Image (cartoon, helix red, strand yellow):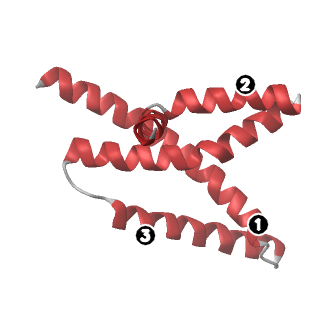
């Protein structure tokens, strides 16, 4: 039973695009609104993309980048918080975190696509 759970989690991390599409389809059925379903799919699958990118970076470059990514993510969060403070003079961390989470989704989806292409090219050339 534990092996099945490990395999399912491994599959989810390996193919987060499929999980995003599944969450989106379920969200459309539940909420009956496409935009709300998109937002829920983004919110629920961002962590999968982050983990997938970190694993792919480790596999492709044979080095761990967790420390660098923690610093990058904290810097992005700080920039978003400062911009929010400058625009609204009051920082609402829930809103800042929502913006941060969506920016992380966009960043890590783009990195995921780039790393998939790099990984395929690396396998073809070796």
Q: Nearer the viewer, mark 1 or mark 2?
A: 2
Q: Position of residue 107 (x, y in %)?
A: 52, 47
Q: How many marks?
A: 3
Q: Nearer the viewer, residue 81 or 109?
A: 109
Residue drawn at x 64%, y 27% as measured from the top left: 22
Left or right of 20 on screen, residue 52: left
Q: Residue at horizontal 49%, vertical 43%?
A: 49
Quadrant assignment, res 87: bottom right
Q: Depth-wise, is mark 3 or mark 2 nearer the camera? A: 2
Classify the position of the C terminus by image quarter.
top left
**Secondary structure beneath disc 1?**
helix
In the rendered image, which residue does mark 2 sit on?
25
Neighbourhood count class around disc 3 (C-alpha, 10 Å): few under 14, some 14–19, many 20 upward: few
Between disc 1 and disc 2, whose residue precedes? Answer: 2
User: Residue 37: x, y in percent?
Assistant: 78, 34
The residue drawn where x is 75% and y is 76% is: 85
Residue on which the image places disc 3 = 71
Kindly indicate the quadrant of the structure image that contains residue 91: bottom right
* Marks 1 & 2, CB-CB < 8 Å contact: no
Instruction: Tell me the crowding category of disc 1: few under 14, some 14 to 19, or many 20 or more residues within 10 angstroms, Cα based.
Output: few
In the rendered structure, which disc, 1 or 3, sits on the residue that comes first in sequence? 3
Rounded to the nearest whole Å, what is the CA distance between mark 3 and mark 2? 34 Å
Locate residue 33 relative to residue 123 in the image: left or right.
right
Q: Which residue is mark 1?
A: 94
Neighbour tally class for label 2: few under 14, some 14-19, many 20 plus, Cα within 10 Å: some
Mark 2, secondary structure of its residue: helix
Give me the residue at 36% from left, 31% from top: 116
């Amino acid at each position: 039973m534990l092996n099945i759970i490990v395999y399912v989690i491994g599959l989810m991390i390996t193919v987060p695009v499929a999980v995003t599409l599944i969450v989106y389809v379920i969200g459309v059925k539940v909420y009956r609104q496409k935009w709300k379903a998109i937002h829920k799919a983004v919110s629920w699958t961002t962590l999968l993309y982050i983990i997938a990118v970190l694993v792919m970076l480790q596999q492709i470059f044979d080095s761990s980048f967790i420390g660098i990514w923690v610093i990058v993510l904290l810097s992005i969060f700080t920039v978003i918080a400062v911009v929010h403070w400058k625009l609204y003079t009051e920082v609402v961390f829930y809103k800042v975190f929502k913006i941060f989470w969506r920016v992380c989704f966009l960043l890590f989806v783009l990195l995921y696509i780039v790393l998939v292409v790099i990984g395929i090219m690396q396998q073809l050339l070796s």
